[in-house]
Amino acid sequence: MTENDFVSSRYIENQIEGTVTWKSPSNIALVKYWGKKENQIPANPSISFTLYHCATTTTLAYVKRNKEQQQERFSFDLLFEGSPKPEFKPKIGKFFERVEKYIPFVKDYHFSIDTSNSFPHSSGIASSASGMSALALCLMSVEKALNEKITNDYFNQKASFLARLGSGSACRSIEGEMVVWGQNEDVKEASDLYGVKLSQEIHSVFKNYQDTILLVDKGQKQVSSTVGHDLMHGHPFAEMRFKQAETNLSKLIKILQNGDQKGFIELVESEALTLHAMMMTSLPYFILMKPHTLQIINKIWEYRSATGSNLCFTLDAGANVHLLYPENEKDTVLTFIKNELVAYCENGQYICDQIGLGAELIKN
Ligand code: PMV
């Protein structure tokens, strides 16, 4: 598929109004995307686990605008967790600008967007992946109402394509259980334009993998990911890092197939620390980990060497720690978290999640 395949030129139906609700999950990258080219094209391929509980539910009500209402380019209201949220509007407006070429109907309707997250507000969990993918899916349902001929495959691909234009990693939130984004040698169907479900069968030890997110710092990030991606331009280690990500993706796909848990731990933790190493070695440099992030990492390493557990960690662009582990270690790891790690979480908060199957249509 090329970019032009996602440009809708004409609509068959003339839908006046409607409402649709989608629930879309967050995702956690194992091989990280950090650095991009123009138009949200990733500098390297990435792969993620789709989450299950951490999700955004968005209801989109749409009604055709009449000619007099069309002075403004786009018309929408926004409710976040039941209240108006004017500070989110510029981001949505920018998203509409980026997607207009592909879904020209956005300027013909007034939209009421009502959105809420399953995870606590300002938990330091990035809501852009679940939020942007939920909105993209709602817009695709409008597209489907205007052109019933579109297939399910096209629906998902274009939802991912549109979500990517809102936030890169959001393109990996449409399907589950694992999604690859970015061209590479190992996954022939992968694309820079949208995420694809990993089609290779994964080993049973990686099915139902658990992700417990320790909320270390619930504050606003000091450096946004947009700025962080940008600092990879001219970064002294950029080219090596992009190559390493490709190699790691290739290695990880083999690990996922052969069930090599030790190999998984080494690769996933190295990816997390490399992401943060890129931040610490850019100019200007910055650190998103907090002292408690490092204390948790050290505790995990001690626990692993004492027990032989397969527990490992990964990090997003923030201080929170994602603990990844197989389902058969759930009870022992949760006891370890309660006894040893909760003390490092802000207000003792953590979220228990696991691999999920992707977004869900709630109402149409
Ligand atoms: O989707 P963005 O632009 O917010 O970038 C997110 C990048 C990381 O979360 C740090 C890594 C990833 O691949 O999800």
Image: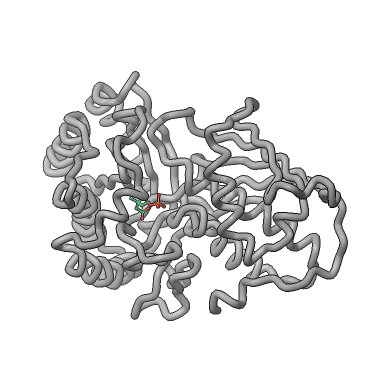
Question: Left or right: where does residue 308 sit relative to residue 159?
Answer: left
Viewer can see residue 272: yes
Quarter of the picture containing the N terminus is bottom right
Residue 342's spot in the image, x, y percent? 29, 25
Residue sitting farthest toward the top: 347
In the rendered image, residue 143, in percent from the top left (x then y), is placed at 73, 61
Q: Residue 120 location in percent, x, y?
A: 48, 28
Of residue 108 and residue 278, the one placed in the foreground of this image is 108
* Above/below status of 123 relative to 263: above
The colour style of the image is one colour
Observer-nearest of 338 and 346? 346
Vertical relation: 26 (above or below) 289: below
Residue 176 visible in the picture: no
Q: Residue at x 35, y 62 (%)?
A: 36
User: What residue sits 65% from the left and 27% below the top?
Assistant: 82
Q: Total of numbered circles in the picture?
A: 0
Quadrant for residue 97, please give it.
bottom right
For image coordinates 21% across by 61% down, the residue present is: 263
Q: Is residue 139 left or right of residue 227?
A: right
Q: Residue at x 62, y 45 (%)?
A: 23
Whether residue 133 sits left or right of residue 205 in the image: it is right
